[in-house]
Amino acid sequence: MAKKKKDAGRKSTAAAAAERMVMGGMPQEEQDDELMQSPFRMVVTSFIRDKIAMIGMCAFIFIFLCCMILPFFFPIQMNYQDVTQANVAPGFGMLDIPKALKDNALDIAAGSTFSVGIDKNGNVYEWGTFPTDKLKKIPSSSEMGKLTMISAGLDHVVAVNEDNQVFTWGNDRMGLASIPIELKTNTSPIKQISAGYQISLALTESGKLYNWGSTYLLSVSIPKEVQGNIAQFDDNPNIVMALTKDGEVVPLTNSTNSYTAVPEEIQGHTVDLALSDESAAAVTDDGRVYTWGNNVYGSMNVPEEIQGHVTSIEGGRYHFTVILDDGTAFTWGNDNFGQTDVPSFSGAVTDVTAGYYASYAIDENGHAEGWGLKGYLMGTDQLGRDVFRRLLVGGRMTMTVGFIAVIISTFIGVLVGGISGYKGGKIDNLLMRLTEIVSSIPFLPFCIILSSILGNSIDETQRIVLIMFILGLLSWPGIARLVRGSVLAEREQEFVTAAKALGVKEFGIILRHILPNIITVIIVNATLDFATCMLTESSLSFIGFGVTEPNATWGNMLNGAQNGQVIENYWWRWLFPSIAFGICTISINCVGDGLRDAIDPKSKER
């Protein structure tokens, strides 16, 4: 009798030890809570305790919310491209005027992605993102002397010193460094210069205009009666226009276009002239602004409140900046980069300049301020598109394609697997053979062949829908097999037998009794398939057979980074999309693994 009690005590002690091992050495209160938890709550609790899975879920939710919400605050135009902003490195230093120049500025000019300026002592300053390293090779002060004016273009700079000498540095293609002999020997003081789009111009006090650089992109034709009578000029990539000393606006071209349709009412009354890339503007002697050309981004929509108060005007790429008679600056037009957010000045503004996407103003105290494009968080691609904005939109597209494809594949897989596992017999055999046929189809070659056959016969929206359906229709065999195995195990349980005895219909048994018991397995598999579908879509887009330009996905963003030059010189074009895509897919897989371990704790041992 004593021996039996002793053995019972040993068994009780061993059982208690085993229970403590199962409960993970938790305190007694937690053990009691664990024993009282429902299966669902136990799964949730186990998942929450998995730190890797929780980190993965938080990372995925963060990326998901960024891609779904932020595009409303950072919208993009799908067909937008601007070669002047191509391959700009990440950073926000385009408007960071050097401290030595900020309160001692004489002249400032804004280029494509950089700016230059000179102080009252004639010293040169450069800042921003430089399109070419040649811009950093500024001639020495001993060579140039004291500069009096400066101008910045796409990727070169033109300057003039107090001895009327012209200097240029930066890109020297197409004759940009070949200053005309006539200008070098000119004795009349230079009053205006311009470093344009692959062209340079200089105007003397005698009214003569000189130009050099590319004659293929922009041909300048100066009538004899105009040459020697020019008071000022302005240029854009399409045309050069002159303002004569008697107030006439003259297009310096032999062709007819929207710029040549100069309003008759301004002829003889114009005191200032400016060009944006798509329109022209003139200030008349009564302080009013007249515009003509193409009204892109509202550049021709002159605010009524400034009419009659404008004294001078400058044009950027798609905006105009003016000085009003009360000494304030005002900007209208394109505001994608804050070009219209004019800062306040302590004194009256005496000079303004407008570049591609930025403007600068200098007040009577020599204090300079800039506004407009500060830079890009993740740089730009080969077409000048913001990588950050495209990353957000591309993530939304990639996730949407993957999500819809998973819904389609899960629905088909659950339906086929459920029927196959429950019915068995010939139906099971037939459906499993169909599953094997579908799973034997090589997915990527099939999509490539289909894309080549369809070619341009479908539009981009139809292509995206087709990709989603193909992904879904060819991805269901795996989940179908998994569901079939689970249903085969569940249909032999007592509750299924009881439901049959009560006369519950087969559809009801599958839907109400078997499916809830295998739903967690379906969720885990769908989560892992989501990452797989995203990878597949990105693979197709990467090799050029998925979602194509101008629509953005993480795959086709990486498509442009296939050559060594991009990888070496433009690292931001492939680094940020690959990081976002890698974190997203790894996070989804971590969540899937965490769910699997929470549902089936023995999977960790395997």
Image: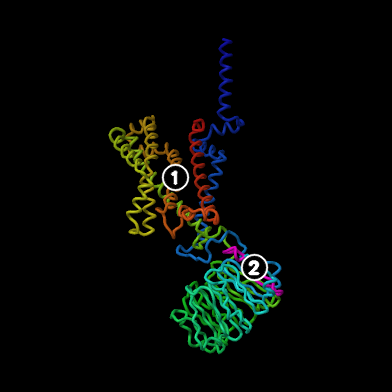
Q: Which residue is mark 2?
A: 138
Q: How is the image coloured?
A: rainbow
At label 2, which amino acid type do we have? Ile
Give the magenta-colored segment's residue range: 116-135
SS for dot 2: loop
Q: Would you place residue 284 above or below residue 155 in this image?
A: below
Residue 359 is at least partly visible in this image: no
Q: Earlier in the sequence, mark 1 or mark 2?
A: 2
Residue 234 is at least partly visible in this image: yes
Q: Residue at x 58, y 59 (%)?
A: 90
User: Tag 2: Cα neighbours inside 10 Å, few (<14), some, or many (≥20)?
Assistant: some
User: Tag 1: Cα neighbours inside 10 Å, few (<14), some, or many (≥20)?
Assistant: some
Callout in the foreground (1, 2): 2
At label 1, which amino acid type do we have? Thr
Q: Which residue is mark 1?
A: 532
Residue 558 relative to residue 409: left or right? right
